[in-house]
Amino acid sequence: MRNVLIEDLLSIGNKYLAANIASRRARQLNAGERPRIKTSHIKPATIALEELAAGALEYRVLPHEPRPDRRLYPAREVDEEIAREFKERERFIPEELEAQIEKEEEEELRES
């Protein structure tokens, strides 16, 4: 049999939906299910595409679920609260100690 072309799958209407259906069917075939059509191909992905093009696969498009309302998840306030908590826990090195550390590092570099 010939390879399946994208034109063979136009009846589905959406190439991404076709890819999703074929990939799910290929997984089923890979797990041991038998092909629904007679084919000479061996690869599960090719068989799945052939089945889809032949109309041997049943599928249904689920209704689109709206995205959650952003107002219910005040991410910005939560992010700001987390940032405040981290800032409170943040440890700062006093300037005198930082100057001493830098001086010691410079001395170590000179010695080596």
Image: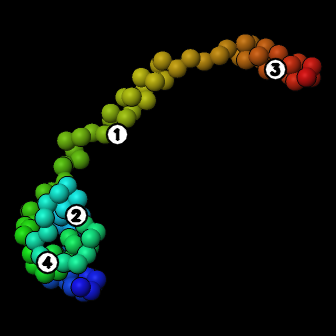
Rounded to the nearest angstrom, the CA distance separating label 1 from label 4 is: 56 Å
Instruction: Tell me the amino acid under the disc marked 3.
Output: Glu
**According to the image, label 1 marks what residue?**
76
Eyeballing the image, is 32 above or below 105?
below
Relative image position of residue 34 (x, y in whole percent): 13, 64
**According to the image, label 3 marks what residue?**
105
Q: Quadrant of the C terminus?
A: top right
**According to the image, label 4 marks what residue?**
38
Neighbours of disc 3 within 10 Å: few (<14), some (14-19), many (20+): few
Which is more N-terminal, label 3 or label 1?
Answer: 1
Rounded to the nearest angstrom, the CA distance separating label 4 from label 2 is: 15 Å
Instruction: Tell me the amino acid under the disc marked 2.
Output: Ala
Q: Are marks 1 and 3 in contact (CB under 8 Å)?
A: no
Rounded to the nearest angstrom, the CA distance separating label 1 from label 3 is: 41 Å
Mark 4: secondary structure? loop
Q: Of discs 3 and 4, which sits in the foreground?
A: 4
Neighbours of disc 1 within 10 Å: few (<14), some (14-19), many (20+): few
